[in-house]
Every structure is written in C-alpha cells, then in structure tokens.
C-alpha cells in the first residue's frame, strides 16, 4: 500500500484510524475518502471548517513557482478587492469569472469585463460558465497562450467552482474522466490535486480560500443549495419610497431612509424571498444596524448573496449579522 495515499476527490491523505477525522475510509484500497464517497453517491454533504492559514500556506506554495494562475471568481460573489490575492501570489494571474449562467442572458459580458479592467490589473480576463460549457474553448486557448510550464494552478474562494471547471475541462480536452469532488458546501477540496489533461498540461486544483465574511457561513444549511443556484437569476425590481423596507429571506432588512421614490433591483438567487413592508414593523430589528449612503449608479453588495442595483442617490439602513461583509461599488451591470 502506498504511504500517504490521497483521496482523488478532495486531495486529503486517506486514513482508517479515526472515523471522526478527515480522510477516513474503512478500506485504504479505496480511491475516495468517506466524505467524498457520500457526496458523490448520496449527495450527502458534511461541512468542515479548516484552518484559514492552511489555505494561505497553499497559496504561498503556488507563489514559490513561476506558473500561471487562474483566479476563479464566482460572478455573483466578486470580492471588494480582488487584487488582495496578489498579497500571496506574485505569478501571472488570469481572472476567470465563473457562473456566467446565473446572470441574465441580456447582460453583456463586455460590460462586466470593462468594469473589471477599469478597476483591476490582471494578465487577462474572461467570463465563463463551467455549468453550460460557456467560453471554455477560449479559456483553454488563453491557458495555452500564457502558461509558463505544464503546471497551471486554479485558486480562488471556496465554492467559486474550481473543481467543477477542471472536471469540465477533463471532459472537453482529455481522454480521462472527471474525478474531483464538487459540492455546494464550502471547503470541499482539501489539498492540492494535480490533474493531467495531456502531456503538456496539468491543471492543479487547490482548496478554496475561506472568507468568514461570506453570508454562507452565517445561514442555516438549507441555504447552501439556494445560494449556489444553478438557475438564471430573475432580477426583482422594487419601487420604494420613504418609510418602506425590504425583507430579504429571514436574515436581511433594508430600510429606505431618504430621497425620492427610488428603484432597487435585486440580483440574488431566485429561491430567496423578498417582501416589501412598512418600516414601522419590527421584523429583524434585533440584528446589527448600519446606515449607508448610496450614490448615483452604485450597487450595495452582500458578500455571498448577490447585490442590489440602486439607481438614485439614497440613504439606507441595513439590519444584518455584523460578521457578514457588505460593500458599495459602481454598478457592475
Ligand atoms: N450556476 C453554476 N454553478 C456552478 C458553476 N460551476 C460550479 N458551480 C457550483 O458551485 C458549487 C461549488 O463548486 P465546486 O466546484 O465544488 O467549487 P470549488 O471552487 O472547487 O470549491 P472548494 O473546493 O470548496 O474550494 C457547486 O454547487 C457547483 O455545482 C457554474 O458555472 N454555474
Ligand atoms: Mg473544489
């Protein structure tokens, strides 16, 4: 038996000593750990919270190479400062915005690319959907164009779709079969996994970086599936006046405080309910409260949920768990 044999789904070292620890398998001859086996066969998922330093150490190990990095970002969960990845990796980075399919078809890719190119400096930018196999041929061409050696790393936040993207590329561009475990639970991949596409290209999957400011860490498990939506978002537009509020799911309330009648368009997964109420009602007022000034053509972003496109200058009051990150940006679309 090979020592330190790794699970081919998540990269963890297999062990049969302790069923409560990661990497457990009843039989070391197996290729998958029990956790991956359950995800693959029964869609059952168990979440673990790794040590954020482990993920940072993996990024540092990528930094020690000169290899091309694909920075995979969920189009609905663009961080406030994408360039903070450069604190850890100094390599050439291509920004890959994944999950194009969740934004309405009517949105132009160019609009999103222009937004990113104005704000950030990466080697190149591309919008893809691994779910719909959208733009993967172009991504493949870019990889061949920019790669410095046979190894190309995929890094990014947990749940951005790194493993799904590699699985899709195995199907498209190699003779192999997809083997990586994917799930809508954060922290699925646990270690680096090198996948050989052909004699000239290895795609290296990495565990996603954990940002505890992501709303997914603060909601009930039932939201995992809802937040990782596979359906095109139908934007919801609300005409809102002073003394009116929006209740979003059972975790967010936005009070409209000033300004004339305004239009709020929500780009959040369809499975999340939205209700307009009178601000005098007490719903969710137990949550942390903060006020924000929104200027002409800005989005209010709730990290991990999506964003609200607001048209006119306004002031809003937001009730939300204090550990969930929010920020304001120029309209993405
Ligand atoms: N709608 C949509 N969902 C996607 C796409 N790609 C991946 N997903 C979903 O996103 C979730 C996370 O996918 P993974 O491939 O496990 O993400 P990851 O980046 O490898 O996550 P970690 O291993 O935790 O770092 C799953 O529910 C996937 O089905 C896509 O192009 N569109
Ligand atoms: Mg993964």
Image: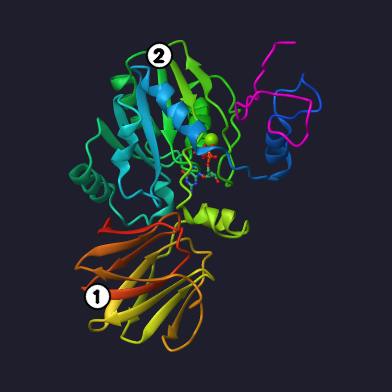
User: In this image, 266 relative to 166: left or right?
Assistant: left
Residue count near mark 1 (Cα–Cα under 10 Å), binned few <14, some 14–19, many ≥20:
some
Position of the C terminus by quadrant: bottom left
- Residue 30 place in picture, x, y as percent: 75, 23
Question: Which residue reaches farthest right?
Answer: 26
User: In this image, 1 relative to 157: left or right?
Assistant: right
SS category of the residue bearing label 2: loop
- Residue 297 place in picture, x, y as percent: 21, 65
Name the image quarter holding residue 10.
top right
- Residue 306 place in picture, x, y as percent: 41, 58
**Residue located beneath label 2 in the image:** 150
Q: Nearer the viewer, residue 15 or 330?
A: 15
175 shown above or below 157: above
Report, in whole angstroms, how far the alpha carbon at label 1 lies from the one at label 2: 51 Å
Verify whether residue 223 appears in magenta: no
User: In this image, 235 relative to 176: left or right?
Assistant: left
The rendered magenta stretch, by its main secondary structure, is classed as: loop
Q: Residue at x 55, y 27 (%)?
A: 191
Q: Residue at x 26, y 83 (%)?
A: 261
Residue count near mark 2 (Cα–Cα under 10 Å), binned few <14, some 14–19, many ≥20:
some
Which badge, 1 or 2, comes first in the chain's sequence?
A: 2
298 shown above or below 167: below
Mark nearer the viewer, 1 or 2: 1
What range is drawn magenta here? 1-22
**Residue located beneath label 1 in the image:** 314
Q: Residue at x 77, y 20 (%)?
A: 28
- Residue 224 place in picture, x, y as percent: 58, 54
**Coloration mode:** rainbow
């Amino acid at each position: 038996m090979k020592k330190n044999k790794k699970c081919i789904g998540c990269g963890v070292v297999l062990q049969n000593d302790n069923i409560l620890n990661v990497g457990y398998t009843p039989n070391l001859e197996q290729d998958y750990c029990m956790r991956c086996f359950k995800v693959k066969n029964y869609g059952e998922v168990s979440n673990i919270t790794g040590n954020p330093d482990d993920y940072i150490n993996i990024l540092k190990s990528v930094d020690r190479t000169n290899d091309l990095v694909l920075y995979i970002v969920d189009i609905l969960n663009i961080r406030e400062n994408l360039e903070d990845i450069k604190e850890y990796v100094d390599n050439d980075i291509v920004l890959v915005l994944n999950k194009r399919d969740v934004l309405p078809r009517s949105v132009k890719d160019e609009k999103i690319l222009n937004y990113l190119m104005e704000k950030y400096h990466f080697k190149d930018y591309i919008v893809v959907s691994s779910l719909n196999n959208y733009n993967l041929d172009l991504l493949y061409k870019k990889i061949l164009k920019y790669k410095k050696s046979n190894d190309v790393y995929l890094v990014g936040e947990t749940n951005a779709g790194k493993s799904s993207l590699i699985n899709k590329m195995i199907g498209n561009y190699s003779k192999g079969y997809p083997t990586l475990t994917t799930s809508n639970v954060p922290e699925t991949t646990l270690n680096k996994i090198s996948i050989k596409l052909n004699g000239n290209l290895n795609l290296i999957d990495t565990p996603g970086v954990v940002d505890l400011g992501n709303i997914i860490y603060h909601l009930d498990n039932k939201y995992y599936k809802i937040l990782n939506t596979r359906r095109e978002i139908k934007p919801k537009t609300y005409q809102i006046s002073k003394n009116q509020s929006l209740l979003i799911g059972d975790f967010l309330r936005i009070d409209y405080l000033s300004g004339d009648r305004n239009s709020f368009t929500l780009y959040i997964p369809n499975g999340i309910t939205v209700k307009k109420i009178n601000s005098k009602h007490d719903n969710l007022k137990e949550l942390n409260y903060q006020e924000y000034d929104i200027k002409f053509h800005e989005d209010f972003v709730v990290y991990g949920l999506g964003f609200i496109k607001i048209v006119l200058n306004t002031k809003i009051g937001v009730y939300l768990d204090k550990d969930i990150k929010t920020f304001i940006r120029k309209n993405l679309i």
